[in-house]
């Protein structure tokens, strides 16, 4: 048994990855510890467990002994960070304890809910079929819309549509949406989960070509929606999503009933003085203080008390109480936001879930991960500052590499013959609107909806074949064609050309700031972990005989033989 310095290949990345390590079994190829520090030691089983959690890119390389020592060094780094975090008292920090309590409570709630509530929820094939047919999951629609500021304006749009007015023209004239100049065309197919409920209910039952005959109220204003096209959706493509949606809805209802039963079991009470104090706080939009904050707001389970101070953040400025704070509303919010979780945690503890092996393993692993994370945050991450000047300098240094993708936008008009294409070129040359010509002449399916818009990138040579160089060399405002293609003759009007353009500082600022922070954090962590290694080196005991014995036939060698 000797003391010594450790080999640390790929040190920092592997040390950070060791935060995810958890204890393995006591069995191993070599009995006894491979390395120790204080009352902690890593044996063969723990080494295997940790190595199995590392992604391929972070696996150390070298001889078997070098690999073993590198992995063990990372585990030592991790435990050194735990010891340092404890020495600094981070495990007693209020933020640490609060987060630990929340995560452990969440684990107990999930375990109890999955085992007791979830086991009572079943979803039948008939329910899935009903949701699929009855709620329009059997198709997606291609919509256009006209957004109005008032209901009266929307009704006027509907009146004109009833009289035969063109939807796209009305959108250009009346819509206040950003896509008005596109005739209200939204550019993609929507299913029931792709839009807000009001729009789904209003539009998804309409036949193709029809529009909503009453205004649809949304947060943006009043909508009139037209269904331009629809495409069928097979049940198999949405079955999993439907099953999950139905399951969750039934799960929430089952959980609500279960919590109601727990309220009876644990004698829940809402003391009047505390509830009145919360009503006052909601009315004044100000949290209670002093003796008032110490009043009991909820009591349950004999000796469990939640005070006004504990719960008032859920009540003050709650939108559900806006305008008329009252005791009934306060109790409803406390029941849904606070009490249900508290009761579920209490029930989980009463049935012993907090002593189960799976939970205690999670609890211990969470403690280790959290204290390492707190130490790294306090001693490294929070010490890193990136100034605006730093970011500007990084932008200037790399400016030539921050280029936008070269691209072009054009309107495409597809016709059947060269003579028709020549006529299109002539009309464009005389100043006629390309979008209007698309609508009147183009044979391309969907051209009227897309208004002939095509995007051309530097990698689109295959799409344009022998015409690519001609297209790619065109300038903004020019006409290209006729181009003979398998579909007919194409004329392009080039609306915009973006080539060799640099991204602005504002475009790059957030990304560069993040990049600089990561780089500095990485370097600072290297310095900090090296300092800890030196400080704790005399406390680390390496069992070289065991390591060398294990290296002669490492456990991962058996898997490759």
Image (spheres, rainbow, N blue to C red):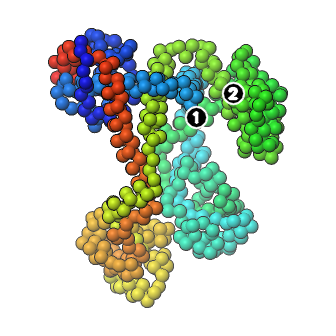
Which label is found at residue 339?
Answer: 2
Q: Residue lying farthest bottom?
A: 430
- Residue that badge 1 annotates: 248
Position of residue 269 measured from the top left corner of the image (x, y, whole percent): 77, 23
Q: Earlier in the sequence, mark 1 or mark 2?
A: 1
Horizontally, is 151 left or right of 532 in the view? right
Q: Quadrant of residue 304?
A: top right
Q: Residues within 10 Å of mark 1 (few under 14, many from 20)?
A: some
Nearer to us: label 1 or label 2: 2
SS at mark 2?
helix
Q: Which quadrant of the structure image shows residue 225?
A: bottom right
Tell me if 205 is positioned left or right of 420 in this view. right
The reply to whether residue 410 is visible in this rendering is no
Q: Between residues 100 and 496, which one lies in front from this camera angle?
A: 100
Q: Quadrant of residue 125?
A: top right
User: What is the x, y in percent for residue 206?
Assistant: 61, 57
Expressed as whole percent of the image width and height from the top left, the position of residue 41 reads 34, 16
Q: Is residue 498 above or below residue 299?
A: below
* Above or below, comparing residue 277 to residue 45 in the picture: below
């Amino acid at each position: 048994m000797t003391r010594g310095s450790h080999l640390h290949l790929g040190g920092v990345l592997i040390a950070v990855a060791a935060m995810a390590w958890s204890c393995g079994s006591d069995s191993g190829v070599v009995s006894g510890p491979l390395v120790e520090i204080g009352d902690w030691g890593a044996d063969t089983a723990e080494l295997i467990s940790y190595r199995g959690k590392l992604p391929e890119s972070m696996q150390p390389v070298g001889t078997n002994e070098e690999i073993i020592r590198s992995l063990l060094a990372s585990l030592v780094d991790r435990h050194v960070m735990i010891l340092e975090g404890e020495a600094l008292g981070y495990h007693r920090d209020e933020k640490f304890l609060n987060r630990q309590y929340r995560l452990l409570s969440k684990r107990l709630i999930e375990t109890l809910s999955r085992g007791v509530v979830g086991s009572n929820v079943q979803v039948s094939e008939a329910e899935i079929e009903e949701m699929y047919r009855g709620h329009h999951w059997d198709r997606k629609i291609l919509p256009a819309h006209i957004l109005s500021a008032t209901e009266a304006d929307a009704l006027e749009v509907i009146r004109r549509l009833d009289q035969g007015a063109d939807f796209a023209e009305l959108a250009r004239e009346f819509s206040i949406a950003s896509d008005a100049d596109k005739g209200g065309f939204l550019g993609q197919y929507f299913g029931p989960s792709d839009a807000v409920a009001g729009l789904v209910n209003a539009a998804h039952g309409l036949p193709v070509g029809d529009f909503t005959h009453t205004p649809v109220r949304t947060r943006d204003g009043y909508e009139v929606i037209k269904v331009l096209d629809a495409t069928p959706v097979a049940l198999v493509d949405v079955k999993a999503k439907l099953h999950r949606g139905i399951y969750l809805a039934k799960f929430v209802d089952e959980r609500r009933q279960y919590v109601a039963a727990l309220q009876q079991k644990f004698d829940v009470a809402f003391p009047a003085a505390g509830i009145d104090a919360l009503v006052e706080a909601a009315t004044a939009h100000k949290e209670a203080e002093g003796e008032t904050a110490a009043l009991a707001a909820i009591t349950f389970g004999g000796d469990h008390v939640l005070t006004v101070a504990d719960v008032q953040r859920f009540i003050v400025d709650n939108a559900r109480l806006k305008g008329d704070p009252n005791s009934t509303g306060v109790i409803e919010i406390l029941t849904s936001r606070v009490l249900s979780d508290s009761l579920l945690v209490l029930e989980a503890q009463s049935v012993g879930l907090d002593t189960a092996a799976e939970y205690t393993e999670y609890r211990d692993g969470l403690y280790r991960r959290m204290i390492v994370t707190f130490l790294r945050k306090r001693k490294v991450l929070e010490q890193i500052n990136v100034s605006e000047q730093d970011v500007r300098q990084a932008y200037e240094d790399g400016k030539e590499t921050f280029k936008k993708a070269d691209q072009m936008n054009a309107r495409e008009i597809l016709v059947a013959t060269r003579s028709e294409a020549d006529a299109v070129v002539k009309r464009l040359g005389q100043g006629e609107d390309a979008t209007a010509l698309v609508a009147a002449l183009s044979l391309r399916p969907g051209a009227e909806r897309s208004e002939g818009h095509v995007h051309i990138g530097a990698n689109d040579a295959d799409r344009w074949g022998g015409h690519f160089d001609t297209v790619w060399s065109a300038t903004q405002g020019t006409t290209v064609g006729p181009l003979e293609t398998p579909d007919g003759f194409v004329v392009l009007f080039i609306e915009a050309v973006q080539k060799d353009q640099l991204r602005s500082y504002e475009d790059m600022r957030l990304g560069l700031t993040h990049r600089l922070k990561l780089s500095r954090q990485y370097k600072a962590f290297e310095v900090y972990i090296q300092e800890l290694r030196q400080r704790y080196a005399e406390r680390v005991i390496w069992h070289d005989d065991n390591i060398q014995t294990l290296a002669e036939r490492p456990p991962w060698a058996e898997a490759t033989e």
